[in-house]
């Protein structure tokens, strides 16, 4: 298992993961699959996120030559689309040159960064500048659901001296939202209590028994955070008992809504419905204290933590909350957050989305996964540094335990899959069960298996005879719908397109695995199982991958869902000085382009490919450009996502075009002229790689070889 601190790979993996939605998440060829952060519990709005993420352009089947020669070395036990698993394809969206040039001119940025921004939909200079500055105008909190009624009900409870109980959830978002609500209500002078459900005794959501108990204990108002939107019967019952409820949530509502004030992203007129649960409470704070009030702003550290940990898209208001919140986290006065960063080895001065998603969030989630989320909440709330240290130590211990449990289940699940007969291995969706697996971590392990096998996976744990499953999907597969089709074999089930949970009778497990695979077979073909990297910009020939460019690209951070770290493509490269590092796990090399050194590259998890990569062949290298701090020096480094074989005819088509360019215009081939026009190639103008031309990409993919005509 890859441990934190191992060559800094954890950041690499975290950012890859946080880039979720691009391809199938992690596709680094890792001998032991890498650690992941908590599960994607809910993708708030598949439409908004995916349409941003999925660039529409013709896929180029830019694959390596047939694998026959390497079969013995690399083929996994069953011949399941190994080429896809390891290489996949890349796609490149169109990038209107007018928009790109305008950004270069107006913002004074490089052609490359401008291309990234245009491809991500920031083609207007004003919008792009606001994005870079992290400056989104905060939307009016009173547009969010029944905000006015909710505030009135809360104020009335405070005035009447009725106790308010905040009801949250057991993950980072639910715990941070509870903390934030408690702190805000205290500012109002309210008598506040809180309740966090246990994953094991109560499970997700608001339970009737809990509300009844709170009513009996003299509570006057329950404020739900990060849950409650579907608690229709529970709320009705509570109100009959004289207990008022205000729901704040960001999950998908059912057809009927609870009969009480609801502050939720859906249904709502709110312009940006992708807030996390803590973000919703932050808006409640703005409504209660005023948008310019310092009171909610003091807790932006919690908002950033939850926004990043809950994997909501880091665009629009979430982006500005994350940027402001990460700054607040760097200088937080909360003893708990300081202690947590210290025990997680996170330097507050450089805390970023990767550190939150990969180091802080798993520790906070460990409480709810293995025990009770109470400890994480107490950590957030405590004002005593000694108490904070004790709680942080305890979370550290729980997190270690979580890693061990998760590692064991992962090994067992992988062993099961690899022992399957080939026809079972070839299934397009896997369901794997273990009698003594821990239900608190099966979701994380399912994500890991999705990364490993590039197909939907449901993991089922037979805890206490009550079998429970947790599934994770790939972008091309609606897991929720697939479970619906198998509903006859399931007990309770629910979730989202990307992630879902279920309960099942033991005797139905095998039948479900079969039905689930059948469902996938009707929806997915082999191509859907191939990871697709969406390229943000093609590096032009001769372009300098400098520290300045690193810094410029870093202005697009924080990276995560909806705003992944830019993936650049350097086409037609030679790989020089190939060597493995880290016990053969990783690959290090220098990228050479057109006979010139183009930079130092590290490819995490690709060490085993050392012997197949040929020094005389050309490769298209997809990478992120990062600063590498080493031994007191800083240098740009290409952090490789994937290495593709360059299309066989790339070299000859390029040579043909170079020859055409030298001819007088009247003598040029029409196809060549069209490509030059498309790229607006002029003497002394900005360089653009031929791959930026859709027409050129078409020629590369065309059959029969068109170069023969040239
Ligand atoms: Mn949430």
Image: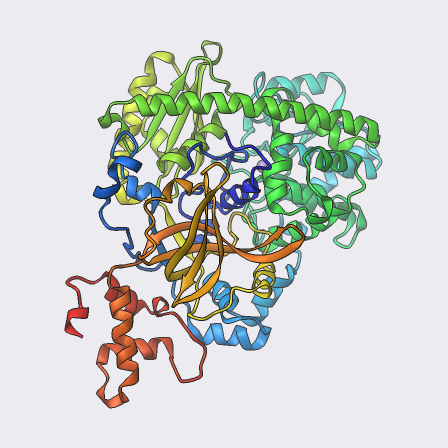
Decide if residue 564 is on the left or right side of residue 341.
left
Q: Looking at the image, which residue is at 67% across and 50% down?
A: 141
Q: In which quarter of the image is residue 136?
A: bottom right
x, y (%) of residue 273?
55, 48
x, y (%) of residue 109?
57, 71
x, y (%) of residue 176?
68, 36
x, y (%) of residue 569?
42, 59
Residue 364 seen in render: yes
Q: Looking at the image, which residue is at 47% across and 63% down?
A: 598
Decide if residue 200 is on the left or right side of residue 49.
right
Q: Looking at the image, which residue is at 24% across and 36% down?
A: 522
Residue 109 or 195: which is nearer the viewer? 109
Q: Looking at the image, which residue is at 28% across and 25% down?
A: 515
Q: Quadrant of ligand 1?
A: top right
Residue 221 seen in render: no
Decide if residue 536 is on the left or right side of residue 159.
left
Q: In which quarter of the image is residue 546?
A: bottom right
């Amino acid at each position: 298992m890859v441990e934190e601190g191992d060559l800094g790979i954890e950041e690499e993996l975290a950012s890859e993961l946080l880039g979720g939605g691009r391809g199938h998440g992690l596709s680094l060829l890792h001998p032991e699959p890498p650690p992941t952060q908590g599960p994607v519990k809910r993708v708030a709005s598949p439409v908004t996120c995916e349409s941003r993420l999925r660039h529409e352009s013709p896929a180029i089947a830019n694959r390596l030559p047939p694998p026959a020669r390497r079969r013995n070395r690399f083929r996994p036990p069953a011949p399941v689309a190994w080429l896809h698993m390891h290489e996949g394809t890349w796609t490149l969206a169109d990038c209107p040159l007018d928009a790109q040039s305008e950004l270069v001119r107006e913002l004074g940025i490089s052609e490359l960064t401008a291309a990234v921004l245009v491809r991500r939909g920031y083609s207007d200079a004003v919008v792009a500048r606001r994005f870079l500055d992290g400056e989104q105008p905060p939307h009016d909190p009173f547009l969010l659901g029944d905000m006015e009624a909710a505030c009135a009900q809360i104020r009335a409870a405070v005035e009447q001296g009725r106790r308010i109980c905040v009801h949250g959830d057991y993950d980072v978002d639910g715990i941070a939202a509870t903390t934030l609500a408690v702190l805000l209500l205290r500012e109002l002078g309210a008598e506040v209590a809180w309740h966090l459900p246990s994953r094991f005794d109560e499970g997700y959501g608001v339970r009737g028994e809990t509300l009844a108990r709170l009513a009996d204990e003299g509570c006057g108002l329950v404020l739900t955070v990060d849950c409650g939107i579907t608690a229709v019967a529970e709320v009705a019952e509570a109100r009959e008992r004289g207990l008022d409820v205000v729901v704040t949530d960001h999950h998908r509502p059912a057809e009927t809504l609870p009969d009480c004030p609801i502050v939720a992203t859906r249904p709502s007129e709110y312009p940006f419905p992708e807030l996390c649960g803590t973000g919703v409470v932050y808006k409640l704070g703005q409504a209660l204290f005023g948008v310019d009030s310092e009171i909610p702003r003091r807790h932006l550290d919690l908002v950033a933590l939850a926004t990043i940990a809950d994997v909501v898209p880091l665009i629009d208001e979430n982006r500005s909350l994350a940027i402001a919140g990460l700054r607040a986290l760097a200088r937080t006065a909360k003893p708990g957050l300081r202690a947590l960063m210290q025990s997680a080895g996170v330097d507050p001065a450089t805390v970023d989305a990767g550190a939150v998603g990969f180091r802080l969030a798993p520790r906070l989630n460990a409480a709810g996964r293995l025990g009770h989320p109470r400890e994480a909440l107490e950590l957030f709330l405590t004002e005593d540094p000694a108490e904070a240290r004790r709680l942080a130590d305890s979370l550290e211990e729980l997190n270690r335990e979580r890693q061990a449990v998760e590692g064991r289940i992962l090994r067992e699940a992988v062993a099961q899959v690899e022992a399957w007969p080939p026809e079972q291995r070839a299934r397009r969706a896997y369901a794997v069960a273990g009698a003594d697996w821990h239900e608190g971590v099966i979701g994380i392990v399912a994500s890991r298996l999705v990364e490993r096998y590039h197909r939907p996976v449901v993991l089922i744990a037979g805890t206490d005879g009550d079998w429970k499953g947790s599934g994770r999907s790939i972008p091309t597969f609606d897991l929720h719908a697939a479970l619906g089709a198998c509903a006859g074999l399931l007990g309770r089930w629910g979730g989202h397109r990307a992630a879902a949970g279920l309960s099942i009778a033991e005797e139905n497990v095998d039948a479900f695995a079969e039905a689930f695979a059948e469902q996938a077979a009707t929806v997915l073909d082999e191509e859907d199982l191939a990871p697709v990297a969406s390229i943000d910009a093609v590096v032009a020939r001769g372009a300098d991958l400098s520290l300045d460019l690193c810094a410029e690209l870093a202005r697009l951070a924080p990276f995560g869902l909806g705003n992944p770290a830019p993936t650049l493509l350097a086409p037609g490269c030679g790989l020089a000085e190939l060597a493995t590092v880290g016990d053969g796990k990783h690959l290090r090399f220098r990228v050479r382009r057109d006979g010139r050194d183009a930079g130092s590259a590290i490819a995490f998890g690709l060490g085993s490919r050392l012997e197949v990569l040929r020094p005389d062949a050309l490769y298209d290298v997809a990478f992120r450009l990062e600063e590498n701090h080493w031994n007191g020096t800083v240098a740009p480094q290409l952090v490789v996502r994937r290495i593709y074989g360059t299309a066989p005819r790339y070299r000859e088509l390029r040579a043909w075009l170079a020859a055409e360019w030298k001819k007088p215009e009247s003598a040029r081939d029409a196809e060549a002229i069209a490509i030059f026009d498309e790229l607006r190639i002029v003497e002394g103008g900005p360089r653009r790689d031929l791959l930026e031309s859709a027409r050129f990409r078409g020629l590369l993919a065309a059959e029969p070889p068109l170069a023969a005509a040239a």
